[in-house]
Image: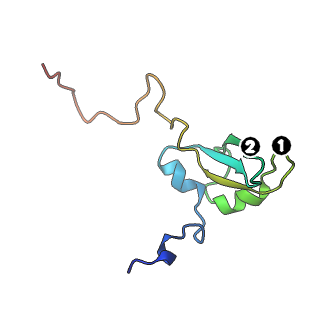
Amino acid sequence: MPWSIKNLVFHDKPGPLSNQRSLGYEKVWVYCSNSNCRHSAVLDVSHMSDEVTFNELMPRMLCTIRDHRGADVCTAWHVPRRGDGPGESRRESSGPTRRIV
């Protein structure tokens, strides 16, 4: 595929929640699309279907500060993923570990 500006537009292709879940993320970052507001929140979407897309979520969001309907929704990259907490590990051990001295 040749490089072009058209290839850089990602919003034309709806991204399902299953894509972010496959990477271990269960939350989305929602921020008000009103330029005077800048209110944002992190929402847990683990109860929603895998087929729900970010484009479907945007018009459903309502800002609790300005009562503005419509928001930008993206993966909450800044929130720790499943298995990133203390004492948790995402990687499965492939065998005994060796201590390097």
Residue at image position (41%, 36%) is: 90
Mark 1 or 2 closer to N-term?
2
**Circle 1 SS class:** loop
Give the class, few, some or many, for how many residues have Cα within 10 Å of label 1's Cα (few <14, many ≥20).
few
Residue of label 2: 39
* Viewer can see residue 66: yes
Q: CA distance from mark 1 to mark 2?
A: 8 Å
Residue under the image location 36 percent in, 36 percent down: 91
Q: Residue furthest right?
A: 67
Question: Residue 83 at x, y = what percent?
Answer: 47, 33
Foreground residue among 62 and 93: 62
**Which image quadrant for residue 56?**
bottom right
The colour scheme is rainbow
Q: Are marks 1 and 2 in contact (CB under 8 Å)?
A: yes
Q: Amino acid at mark 2?
A: His
Q: Is residue 8 above or below residue 84?
A: below
User: What residue is shown with label 1?
Assistant: 64
Q: Is residue 57 above or below residue 43?
A: below
Q: Quadrant of the C terminus?
A: top left
